[in-house]
Structures are given as C-alpha cells and as structure tokens.
Amino acid sequence: MQKISFDVLNLQGDGYHILIEANLFDRDFKMVVDTGASKTVLDKNTLLNAGIPEEQFQSTDILSSGLGTNSMQSFILDIPLLKIGRWQRQNYPVAVLDLSSINYAYEQMQLAPVVGVLGGDILHTFGARIDYRKQSLTLRDRPLKLK
C-alpha cells in the first residue's frame, strides 16, 4: 500500500478538487483525482507542450463523452512510467483528450494547469481509499482481484 498526500483545492464556492503530484516522462505535473471519471485521461495540449510527439498518440474510433460533449476525439498513449508518490505503473495506457476547458477554468481562477485526471481505472483497480481528514490517497501496489 502506498499513501500519497494530496491538496484540496477550493473552487471558489463551486466545490472542491483533489490534486496530486504525478510524474510522467520524467516531469512533475498536477493531476485531479476524479472518482467519477471512468478512465485516467491526460491533456493532449499539455503533453505536446511537454515535448511528447503526436506520433505517439494512437488514434481510436471511440468518441469520448463528458466535459459537456459526447463527440470528442480521443487517443491512447502508453505511459512508459507513471509515478504518483512511491506508487508506480509501467507501460500504462491512458486516454488523451483535449482538456483545455478544464485548464481554461483553472486559468480563470489563477490556478496552475493540470496534466489530466486520475480516474476509476486506477482508483478501482488498485483499491483507492481517500481520507480527507489526513489528505491522503492510498493505492495498493498490486491490482485487486476483481470479478
């Protein structure tokens, strides 16, 4: 089990986001923990700005829903090493979408952009526990044996 500290971001009366530090491609980024997201998603523009070539994005025929639309083009990207605290996964596939609407909202609140959201694929599979009092996210080192 790995315990990961997080920050709680007050969205100026519109609720709260849980922010964690994640390391991918040997760079540190902020990510939102999103228990309602089915999959971990990274922002296409942030990845391109970080120097990840677009050729690494694998096109899919899947149109993603959420973020106010159900027709957003999505891609898949295998992350060679995803580290969150001491928890890590190698060659982990994530969805890549245009999350500029999230980062624009953050910018309007004078907050730093995020690279994406940590979703249910990781949270469920690795038995996530969120403790708001201790501001910690706990993830198992090994996947749960789910039916």
Image (cartoon, rainbow, N blue to C red):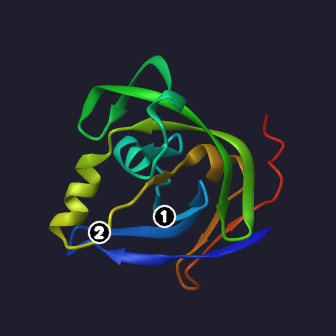
Q: Amino acid at mark 2?
A: Gly
Q: Do the residues bearing badges 2 and 1 touch, measured as CB atoms within 8 Å?
A: no
Q: Is residue 2 above or below residue 147?
A: below
Residue with the mark numbered 1: 29
Where residue 48 sits: x, y (%)? Answer: 40, 44
Residue with the mark numbered 2: 15
Q: Earlier in the sequence, mark 2 or mark 1?
A: 2
The answer to whether 96 appears left or right of 2 in the picture is left
In this view, the residue farthest toward the left is 108
Q: Look at the image and tell me in which quarter the C terminus lies.
A: top right
Residue 2 sits in which quadrant?
Answer: bottom right
The answer to whether 82 appears left or right of 115 in the picture is right
Q: Is residue 103 above or below residue 77?
A: below
Where residue 29 sits: x, y (%)? Answer: 48, 64
Q: Nearer the viewer, residue 11 or 74?
A: 74
Q: Nearer the viewer, residue 132 or 18?
A: 18
Residue at x-position 55% and y-position 62%: 27
Residue at x-position 46% and y-position 46%: 42
Residue at x-position 50% and y-position 30%: 57
Badge 2: how crowded within 10 Å, few (<14), some, or many (20+)? few
Where residue 123 sits: x, y (%)? Answer: 62, 53
